[in-house]
Image (cartoon, helix red, strand yellow):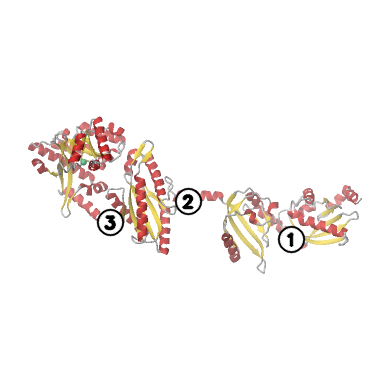
Amino acid sequence: MGDNSVEAWLSDHSWHKLADSVSEPLLTIAADGRLAHVNSAIESCLGYPAASFILLFNQLLGANQDRRLLLLQETIDRLQRQISEGQASSHTTEALELQHRDGFHVSCELLCVAQPAGGLLCLLQKTQAAGHAHESQALAAKVLDSSLSGIYITDAAGKIVQVNRAFSRLTEFSAAEVLGQSPQCLDVERYAAAYFKSISDSLERKGSWEGEIQHRRKGGQVFPAWVSITVLRDELGAIINTISHFSDITEKKNSDHKIHRLAYIDPLTDLPNRSLFADRFAQALGRAKRQNAMVALLFLDLDGFKTINDSLGYACGDRLLREAAQRLRDCVRTDDTVARLGGDEFAVILGDLSDRAAAMTAAAHIAEKVRHVLAEAFLLEDKRLLTGASIGIAFYPSDGAEPSTLLQHADTAMYHAKAQGKNNYQFYSAGLNERAREQLALESELRVAIDSGQLELHYQPILSASEGAPVAVEALVRWQHPSRGMIMPNDFITMAEDSGLIRPLGTWVLREACAQLRIWQEQGVAVERVAINVSAKQFKEGHLLQTLHEVMAEHQLEPASIEIELTESALMADHHFVQQSLEEIKRLGVSISIDDFGAGYSSLSHLKHLPIDTIKVDRSFISGLPAREDKQIVQAIIALGKSLNLRTVAEGIETPLQLEFVQELGCDEVQGFMLSQPMPAKDILLW
Ligand SMILES: [Mg+2]
């Protein structure tokens, strides 16, 4: 009957009009506790349109869907029970701290009047203070919602009391799902307790904290967030609220990562570049200084890389560098730095070495490993390329305290390794600098030597293998240094190439040899052929044809009596250039010999198309005879020479066994200390 009475009011249109004219929320509760009606004032008070408020309120009877309405629902429920049981007056007032739909608090007074039929009529009045608060809170809510950063506010108990729209967008949690919860729902478990402690310490000390934290979305996806936390306290210093702002910095981090890569990583090899190397090196030195430890710096450069780059093209050179970088990385511990300093120069930093013995052992071990892996052939497409590494090593603090000094010293040691025949490693020593200075002095002395007659040619006979008769001589340059005595070409040709002196030196050799040949011819000495060494660098400079032309004209020589000896590395230049240059020399009538054959990596197919007359088997294979492997190589080279219709010469014959062996294989000509040493021109007359 009571329900009928409530229904009766509600069906009365004038009741609706009356209720809606009340500026405060007026709730009509049926005897069974359901919310039968609420006027539209509820929306301005708690943020819910009347219809959805009714729906939510009544849902709460079953399941607590919206925690913000729970307190109101429970209070009404309790008062209704107390009134019906006579424990409360039929006019009851109770103060309540409710929560607006947007999360902020609304202080209210709930006035309940019992209805005769068992229901309640409830008037919700905002308390005066809360009224003002409401306005500023509504404004605050708008401000919060306009923010692009996610914001959540926790109360003194650490429970979330308010979130903004961006919070829901970024975390996928709706406000309803997190209000009343701890912000731990956003946490990623992998943080150590110490990290959170450092945050709470900072909040305690400064009242704020800012930094990066990984947050978790509702779906489980983790994202990096930049978070700033501010603590609000009351006059007594107790925490009232904590406000956390955060933004998703995934994209920023990605672009930071890209920028970092561009600035610090070599794009070709993915190794640290010079800048990052400098950074890591300084760090390693700083650490070593604090811990009284040592650091080893290995500086290395690929042997013959320039030749590969020049002859096979940059694409091939780049692939080689990438592959070499990978092999280098595999040689070191994960903590060690391998960097590409530029071109084919790399550096390895080995840190945390306890003492000199440990440092020497570690550096030698890694250098040996590097030397070994880089000496293995590189298979790039159909090509099999051989390189190697010359490595210089310097130590902190014994070889220097400054990064630049150490780098310079490792570089000096690396040059020393190159001078020692490449593919080896050398430790820096103060003596090396001395040697470098000597080298410089020698260079300026060589300039003088070319013009002042300190150079001379010695001639080594080349004999017919079958008959033993001399058929040619090879001109070999010697430097009669006024104070150092005789210097052999191995000790100054590379320096001449590096300093640009190779052209005047090479021209001098050519002129001198031709002039001598002319003299012999005039003296009636039967020298059929003079073989003249031309350095790869001299050949590649492209003036050889012109010089040959001039010199032969000057001395009226038969071109057939001149043979130039080129090493395989000379052929490793631009194919077109090599082909054309050799053909021009050939047209001149001068013959062409490939010196030190087998030591380089000229391919057979390449050789077949070049106008070559002679191949000289590299002395390293001859000196290895009669070891089985060298036997097979020499055999193969001579067979190759024969099949291409080339003259074959075995140089470096030092024992009768070696001579016998190459004779048996049908080698055409032989040369070596056992047969005859190089000698001054005048001695050739007597020989
Ligand atoms: Mg030679």
Circle number at residue 432: 3
Ligand 1 in which quarter: top left
> Marks 1/2: CA distance?
51 Å
Q: Secondary structure at mark 2?
A: helix
Identify which residue, 594 or 212, lies in the foreground.
Answer: 594
Circle 3 or circle 2, nearest the eye: 3
Residue beneath label 1, please? Answer: 132
The answer to the question of whether label 3 and label 1 lie on touching residues, with beta carbons closer than 8 A, is no
Which image quadrant for residue 553?
Answer: top left
| Position of residue 6 in the picture relative to residue 48 (left or right) | right
Which residue is situated farthest in the right direction here? Answer: 1
Residue beneath label 2, please? Answer: 260
Q: Is residue 313 visible?
A: yes
Circle number at residue 285: none
Residue at the spot 50% in from the left edge and 50% down from the top edge: 257
Labels in figure, total? 3
Q: Secondary structure at mark 3?
A: helix
Which image quadrant for residue 141?
Answer: bottom right
Residue type marked 3? Leu
The answer to the question of whether label 1 and label 2 lie on touching residues, with beta carbons closer than 8 A, is no
Circle 1 or circle 2, nearest the eye: 2
Residue type marked 2? His
Identify which residue, 47 or 31, lies in the foreground.
Answer: 31
| Position of residue 433 in the picture relative to residue 140 (left or right) | left
